[in-house]
């Protein structure tokens, strides 16, 4: 699974060879900013309106593998 760019400014890309089952973005306070179900193999998130800081990206695929990525919005 690829997540880029990090740090992010305008758009965040998530790409996987497996089907992505769920994408959740949390801010530093643990509040859900984005929640997507079954978006496919690639996701583009517009981040232009996000406040600069740290975010956590949780991704689950169709094989129930989970990955957490720490993001920086600059």
Image (spheres, rainbow, N blue to C red):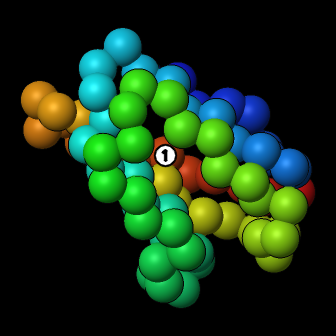
* Residue 67 makes an appearance in the image: no
Residue 40, position as x, y percentages in the image: 38, 33
Please give the residue where the numbered disc 1 appears in the rendered image. 69
Residue 70 visible within the image: yes
Q: Quadrant of the N terminus?
A: top left
69 relative to 22 in the view: left or right: right
Q: Nearer the viewer, residue 11 or 5?
A: 11
Depth check, front residue: 73 or 13: 13
Residue 59 appears left or right of 10: left
Query: Which x, y percent locates residue 67?
Result: 33, 41
Based on the displayed image, in which of its 4 quarters is residue 7 positioned? top right
- Residue at the (49%, 46%) spot, across then down: 69
Q: Report x, y in % for residue 65.
A: 18, 35
Q: Quadrant of residue 38?
A: top left
Outermost residue toward the top in this view: 17
Identify the image quadrant of residue 46. Answer: bottom right
**From what the image shows, is residue 34 above or below residue 40?**
below
Mark 1 surroundings: few (<14), some (14-19) or many (≥20) residues within 10 A: few
Q: 42 above or below 38?
A: above
Number of numbered discs: 1
Identify the element where label 1 is drawn. strand
Q: Residue at x 24, y 35 (%)?
A: 61
Q: Quadrant of the C terminus?
A: bottom right
The residue lying furthest to the left in this view is 63
Q: Residue at x 67, y 65 (%)?
A: 54
Viewer-closest of 71 and 36: 36
> Left or right of 24: which side holds 14?
right
């Amino acid at each position: 699974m690829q997540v880029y760019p990090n740090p992010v400014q305008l758009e965040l890309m998530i790409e996987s060879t497996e089907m992505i089952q769920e994408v959740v973005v949390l801010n530093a306070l643990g509040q859900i900013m984005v929640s997507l179900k079954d978006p496919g193999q690639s996701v583009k998130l517009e981040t232009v309106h996000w406040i600069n800081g740290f975010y956590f990206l949780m991704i689950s695929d169709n094989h129930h593998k989970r990955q957490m990525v720490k993001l920086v919005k600059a």
